[in-house]
Image (cartoon, rainbow, N blue to C red):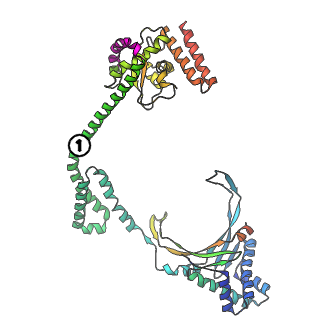
Amino acid sequence: MNTSELIDYMSEKTELPKTECRELFDSLTSIMQSYFDNEAGVLIPDFGTFNVKEKKSRQSFNPATGEHVLLPRKLVLGFTPASQLKDDLK
Amino acid sequence: MASNKITFQELLDEFSAVTGRTKVFSRNFIKDVFATIQEGLRKDENVNIKGLGIFKLQEVAERETQNPRTGILTRIPAHKRIVFRPEKALREMVNSKYEKLKSKPIKKKIAKNSVPEPPPVEKAEEKPAPKETVLLIKEAPAKKSAAPKQQAATPPPVEKKKMPTFIIEEKKKKSAWRWILPLILIILIFVVLYIVPTKYDSLEKFQLRKNSTQLNDIPEEKSNIPGKAAEEAFVKAPKPQPLAIKSPALKSEAPASVTADEEKTFIHIIKSGNTLWGLSKHYYSRATLWPNIYRKNVETVRTPDLLIVGRALIIPELQGDAYELSKADSARIAQGYYLAYRAYKKYDAAAAADYLRVARQFSTVNE
């Protein structure tokens, strides 16, 4: 499934034109993105939690080139599914 | 770290504010969006959403886990795991705070590691003389500054340069330690040698009390012992004295057991790894004669399998050849097997019966 299919579904459900649905959807994702940008997570009931975590810097090794590299610390967006979602899709 | 988490209510409020829709509508809309994602996951196992990323279902194979507290094995059946990978733009946006940090090759790190490593090694070598190590370390940096170019370009050569200076100075100091270390060792050996005999003295006294009646036999035994002690590599200087007093203990058994022509004995101090079997092999060159040793030491050894390091074992000599036993010898060995049978009977009567059988064999050889 991709975004356009999702919007097709949504327009069927809400009985709104697709363009309007797309606008609504885009505003939803942009709101969520703005949260993530501010290192905030979002909890969506019965679906899961999006959370931003900081990963520590670490050394890594490229076996092909034999290079040791120090990777910097970074912020990562993660997703933890809710138990309902997990059980549903088992 | 994401210290703050936005609640669904806050998301709703903002969404309705941005879109100008009612809260009821926006609640239904957002819930529907994620419900359809869930539907899509169930259908295709793969949902790609612009602006967020890819949700995927990943197969997880069946596996077993053990509860470390209870040790119970439980089987986790094969299932599917939900994986979310944010799209590249989102990943970069999230990480914008650390955007400028780039991964670095760790050549420098390796160099840093290699520099601190050598000092501990050198310290270990010089442990006996801590003051001198301080001096040496001070001198080393001076050499470093003398050759700064090489240090910057190639760290390893600098270390090489350092090493010789250390070695030369160590040699001077070591020469002193060469004398002191052996001295300490010698003192230790003397202490050990002093402690070992005193232990035996106490043993002697104990057994003297026990066997005070049979002290008459001692002189004869003594005459035997020195010769044997010299033969045995195991027996060390301080032991001849203990031998004399141990032997009466033997004698106390001997008359009861076999009509003894005087049995010649010597002492073996039990070392780690010794077994009666092994000792018998060593002294008699026939391992199966081990009960002969056991017979002489029933009181101290008890269980033939348990020899205690440092204790003395009385080892009787065979009168004849190990493979053509004299009557007296085989009778003694038969008795030894009988004693072994009695010792093992406590643990496993059926298995111990074998010893009884062997004991009979040896006694019939006699006849």
Magenta span has B117? no
In the depicted structure, whether residue B102 falls above or below residue B233: below
Is residue B327 positioned above or below A23 on the image? above
In the picture, the quarter occupied by the N terminus of chain A is: bottom right
Judged by its main secondary structure, the magenta piece is helix
Magenta stretch bounds: B211-228
Query: Of residues B165 and A90, which is closer to you in this image?
Result: A90
Whether B223 is among the magenta residues is yes
| Res. B178 image quadrant | top left
Residue B124 in view, yes or no: yes
Query: Left or right: where does residue B38 sit relative to residue B126?
Result: right
Q: Identity of the amino acid at label 1?
A: Ile
* Residue found at the very far bottom of the displayed protein: B20
Percent across and percent down for residue B122 are: 30, 54
Residue B333, x across and y down, in percent: 51, 15
Taking the spot 72% from the left edge, 70% from the top edge, the residue there is A84
